[in-house]
Image (spheres, grey):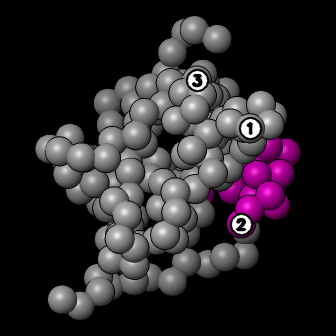
Amino acid sequence: MSEPAYQKPDLALVGAEHVDRYRETDGEVGYEWNGVPVLLLTTTGRRSAEPRTKALIFGRHGDDYLVVASTGGAPKHPSWYLNLLAHPRAEIQVKGEHIPVVGRGVTAGAERERLWRAVNDYWPNYDTYQARTERLIPVVVLTPTTDT
């Protein structure tokens, strides 16, 4: 089986710089990245209890926000995902809006298959990332909440 078609992203804005520019401009810089929308996810560090923020591609599924714990197909889950498993309450920033959320990983079954197809509709590279690793890459559902 051949690896799915991969579109090399422009990596001019990544990591902490992406987070900083997004925050400074309320997403005017950094909300759109390689043609897809990006949000900032702030989790609580599972060991440090400190806030940790990552810029992540996202899509919508009803009222929920979908992100993917891919790390480009690395063999281990990203730290932000492990943080979210330990502390499901988090915050997202979408442009200038700050939204409290509860996150959950979807790792199996019909729901994961349906959500996986949805996330691949907006970022087809996820199939490539999945082909690079033996771990099943989780789709993460971030549900807005009024709880703080």
Q: How far apart are marks 3 and 1 (CA)?
A: 15 Å
Secondary structure, mark 2, is: loop
Judging by the rendered image, the residue that carries numbered circle 2 is 14
Can residue 95 be seen here? no
Q: Distance between the residues labelled 2 and 3?
A: 24 Å
Secondary structure, mark 1, is: loop
Between disc 2 and disc 1, the foreground one is 1
The magenta-colored residue range is 14-32
- Residue 52 image point, x, y percent: 74, 42
Mark sitting on residue 89: 3
In this view, the residue farthest toward the bottom is: 2
Mark sitting on residue 55: none
| Of callouts 2 and 1, the N-terminal one | 2
Judging by the rendered image, the residue that carries numbered circle 1 is 47
Residue in view at x 38 percent, y 51 percent: 138
Are circles 3 and 1 on residues that touch, CB within 8 Å?
no
- Residue 66 image point, x, y percent: 42, 43
Image quarter (top left, top right, bottom left or bottom right) of the N terminus: bottom left
- Residue 108 image point, x, y percent: 24, 46
In the image, residue 44 sits, relative to residue 113, either above or below, namely above
Residue in view at x 14 percent, y 44 percent: 110
